[in-house]
Amino acid sequence: MQTTTFALRRFIVENFLFGREDPPLGEDDSLLGRGIVDSTGVLELVAFIERTFGVDVLDHEIVPANLDSLASLTRFVEGKRRQRPVPG
Amino acid sequence: MCGVAGIVPLDGRPADAATLARMIATLRHRGPDQTASVCRADAGLAHSRLAIIDVEGGAQPMANAEDTLLLTFNGEIFNYVELREELKARGCRFRTASDTEVLLHLYETEGDACVQRLNGQWAFALWDRRRRRLLMSRDRLGVRPLFYTVAGGALLFASEIKALLTCPGVSRDIDLAALDQAFTFWSPLAPRTMFAHIHALPPAHVLTVEHGVVAVRRYWQVDYSPSSTTERSEREHIEHALELLDDATRLRLRADVPVAAYLSGGLDSTLTAALARRAAGQRLRTFSITFDDPELDERTAQEAAARFLDVDHSSIHCTAADVAQVFPDVIRHTETPLLRTGPAPMYLLSRHVREAGFKVALTGEGADELFGGYDIFKELKVRLFCAADPASRRRPLLFRRLYPYLPRLQRQSDAYRAAFFDASVPAASDPLYSHRPRWRAAAKLRGFLSNDVRAALAGRDACADLIDTLPAAYAGWEPFAQASFLETTQLLPGYILASQGDRVGLAHGVETRFPFLDTRVVEFAAALPSRLKMRGLTEKYLLKRAAEGLVPTAVRERPKQPYRSPGVRAFFHPAAPDYVEELLSEREISRHGLFRPAAVAALVRKCRAGEVVGNSDEMALVGILSTQLFSHIFIQGSPSGVSGADDHVRAPALHR
């Protein structure tokens, strides 16, 4: 859980904030509300999640309820990983 | 079109002829046909001329018969023929056929109120020797530029800032509040410029100097209050619009040299060209730009329009590499950072027009602001519609209809689209409601600013600066009118007519003329009810109806495509010019002191990797690169390439 949040935070800070958290990004802060992601940003975020956590994000899952804060992103990614069929 | 410059001493010391000569020498691109100056102890005025009306007799600076008035004038007074007749009937005697002399006589008879009578695009300075008084003025919409500063005990003015920078004692200190504004609104808000001590005379203003006192005053304001003519029928409105546009175009064909037209493939320029073709009664020469990227290219519509109008058409092809190659020259002319590369292709277009033998071109600018063409107006309508019923699940589906040319936005879920546009936030009393989503996206650029710059800007809010400039009546207007006002008074003069208009046109001695910015058209359109500007989500409803039969159906009915040009891709390819890497390097970013090197490095990595780059990253990259160029050319270097006292390198001083 913490590693997931850590990886997501690092990606958001590096890729969207270019290293500056000012003020620091709170777990429940809205990424849209703080102007951190735009329409391309959402797609970048989805690509990062698929690449890093090995899950498929379905079209109907690309909604602010799943992706608009560190907390909701973490919940969403953890939930997807639990659904993932065990290999073999 | 021309360049003007001048010196008016405030402390009794005589105007310096050598300084005046240096100033006007930097503006030769604006007026390559002739340069002249008149420098007396009480004032010095200079002029570089692009001869268009009365090629023989219209030389400037021009004095009146008694030699009590001296005028340097950039632009055109399109109703000069009518004014001349009126003045002759009142006993004025004319020595030339120029519009310049009309302005002199008009001032003689009406004083400062003369500006109210002018229908045109101008920036002028008039020295009244008897009253020892200067009058400067800019046209209502801000087509022609005029800058001034006070230094060395004198008021100095010029068409471009680079002329002022050649004068002794003029500071090059950068204005960080202007940078913040440019990064939010795409240009500093007049009277601010990128230089802390140099001011723009705002559109629709006059400036006077008398007894050593400089005073600036507004003489006109666009009025979006619904007028009493709203009871007219739709048919009457359409007929009236066409009549006005017809006459506005006819007046703008007045020239003693041939007049061409830009043809972008959109409704506005096609209608302008159609009216010009009809009024001129002869074949018209038209010009356009084409791009490689099908998302940007409009050649199919351009060719359809050219065939339909039966004009002699040619285009220049602009590649991404071309944009990068000319970008430093473009910044040299715009004298301000840019968030978009749009001015670069326009710079290439004016060069092409000039090489084809033309120095005047009609264009369609102004129609989107005045007749309701921009997507931001549509966005506003849908946002208001959603905010009126936040529980509705169907209303946000309308966001699908916005920005059809932005594929990445189109791929979003409805929930995200609604969130991007603040669908659930009520307008309440926010005077900038219509533009908040746009300016919030731009404000992300602040994250790249260096710690020193951020500290200097602490507590500043560019949007609050803008709110301070709004007229009292604004609060009572409907949101559509408010949004139109913001576009007409801010983006239009600040960016479209300046960086993307005057400066890149005059870089090659090409004057652009705008029938939609005729005073009568502006006043008519501003007062139109918004239902005639946007019917449902159909933009420019009335104008489209007026264009029936004049513009091919394919052009009239095609979805609006805003003018866009290659961005990040222009600067990241194997053949990109060296300055890109150089100016974005950690060393140069640190040396100029405006941005955070680590953040710029991360952005450059992202762009270079060829990953999907979104709107805000694109604006950040273009904004940072153009600011580095701006700082390199103007703050730390020499803008004109002319060596002189100001040619030394200095660190930027920080100003709030």
Image (cartoon, rainbow, N blue to C red):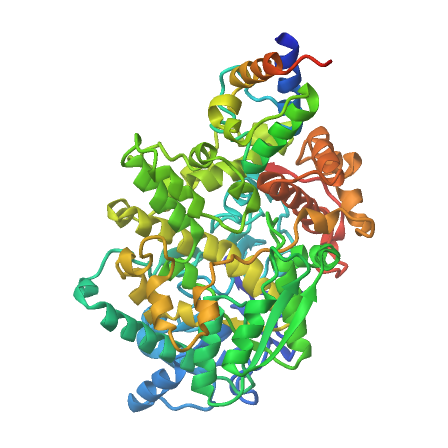
Q: Quadrant of residue B426?
A: top left
Residue A40: x %, y % from top left: 58, 37
Residue B535: image location, x then y, percent = 31, 57
Q: Residue furthest top?
A: A2
**Point 56% across, 70% down: residue:** B302
Quadrant placement of the C terminus of chain B: top right
On the image, the x and y values in percent for residue B418 come to 42, 35
- Quadrant in the rendering for residue A23: top right
Q: Can residue A3 be spotted in the picture?
A: yes
Q: Position of residue A18 (x, y in %)?
A: 66, 28
Q: Residue at x 52, y 55 (%)?
A: B495
What residue appears at the point 66 percent right and 58 percent down from the top-left corner? Answer: B330
Image height of B218 relative to B588, above or below: below
Q: Nearer the viewer, residue B375 or B150?
A: B375
Q: Is residue B21 visible?
A: no
- Between A44 and B598, the one nearer to me in the picture: A44
Q: Nearer the viewer, residue B352 or B301?
A: B301
Residue at point 33% right, 90% down?
A: B88
Screen quadrant of the N terminus of chain B = bottom right
**How many marks are shown on the rendered structure?**
0
* Residue B28 to residue B203: above or below: below
Q: Is residue B519 above or below residue B405?
A: below
